[in-house]
Image: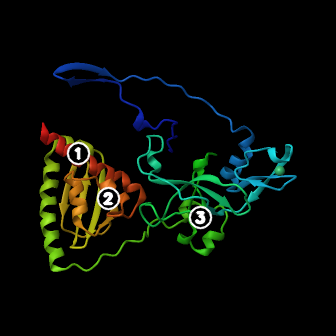
Amino acid sequence: MIKKKKVIDEIYIPDVGSQVETIDGKEYLITNDAMYTFFRRTKGEFSAFFLALKNEKRLLGCKCTKCGIVRVPPFLTHCPDCNFAPTELIEVEQVGIMNSTPPITYFATSLFQHMAPYGRGRVIFKGADTAMSINLYTTTGILVPGIIKKGTEVKLIFRDERIGEMTDVFCVPTAELTQEKINKNGLQESEIDWETPQEPSLPVASEEDSNQYRKALDEMKDLIEDMNRNESVRKAIAGWKRDIQVKTRGGQFAIMIDDGDIKLTESVLSSPDFIMVCDDINALLDGLAYRGAITDSVINKKIWISKNMEFNTIFKLDRMARFLVRSKKV
Ligand SMILES: [Zn+2]
């Protein structure tokens, strides 16, 4: 049986119960409670646009019957430039050009966290005269600055499950797709290859590199053993399971997270959940030792990860580093 999704995800709904928090040596009782309001919202005059996205995988705009300007999305029923002449709905193409370089959101609010990291930018689709705001992704691994810029050609992609919202669609660069897929209208996310990201190549290690690698690896092993023994660090990865293959200039190893346990082994995994490439192992070591954030190293392209959504795991690694340092201070 398929469980129906709720407007508020269950993970955000706290359990009935209470807890005691100690602040400055005094105990305070805290209970979980709720205050909620739900509402229904009509798409009104935009209904045709959203229904076309949802049911027909078509992108609509409105064309002024007088001046011919095509606005996408079709946000005007009458053209203000032509003494309010009526507009008519027309279909536009599903390939367009970035109107600006999109900013990337890495740390989203709870509402958008499941989509991060994502770019948000404006695209002028072929046949349109105005730009449409849309979320942007890449299939080449983590989304970092430089992949999608002003002028980049992008393709409209439809979510497999659509409900008639702007999040039913997003864009990826056409450079990452075959011509056949670029030409296809109504291309869905499941038709795209997300599984063969472009792994950065590493230079051959010198003897000096290998020595540095051994030294850093030993320090990392001690650190991860410390984490594994630490109660608050274990809490940060409760219920989380990831096998990560880490490739560096000096060699490769695996970090395995399994519901509170974390361990490092010098092995090559046959099917890791994702791959992390860091030329200099110290970029990762410094993060785990809380000498800088791993998330920053990802954003600054010192560490590459093969799956965009695994930024979440990187976020957890930073949290573990923070928890370990904090618990040692007490
Ligand atoms: Zn007009």
Q: What SS does tag 2 mark?
A: helix
- Tell me: residue 305, above or below residue 229: below
Q: Which mark is residue 322?
A: 1
Work out whether residue 317 or residue 39 is closer to the camera in this orientation and state it.
Answer: 317
Earlier along the polypeptide chain: callout 3 or callout 1?
Answer: 3
Is residue 52 toward the left or the right of residue 325 in the image? right
Q: Amino acid at mark 3?
A: Val
Circle 3 residue? 154
Q: Residue at x 85, y 46 (%)?
A: 86
Q: Quadrant of residue 109?
A: top left
Circle 2 residue? 297
Q: Quadrant of residue 18?
A: top left
- Tell me: residue 54, above or below residue 232: below
In percent of width and height, residue 5 lies at 51, 40
Nearest to viewer (mark 2 / mark 1): 2
- Mark 3 touches mark 2? (CB < 8 Å): no
Earlier along the polypeptide chain: callout 3 or callout 2?
Answer: 3
- Tell me: residue 316, above or below residue 273: above
What whole-number distance in Å separates the C-alpha atoms at marks 3 and 1?
A: 39 Å
Q: Residue at x 22, y 54 (%)?
A: 288
Earlier along the polypeptide chain: callout 2 or callout 1?
Answer: 2
Q: Amino acid at mark 1?
A: Arg
In percent of width and height, residue 218 lies at 12, 63
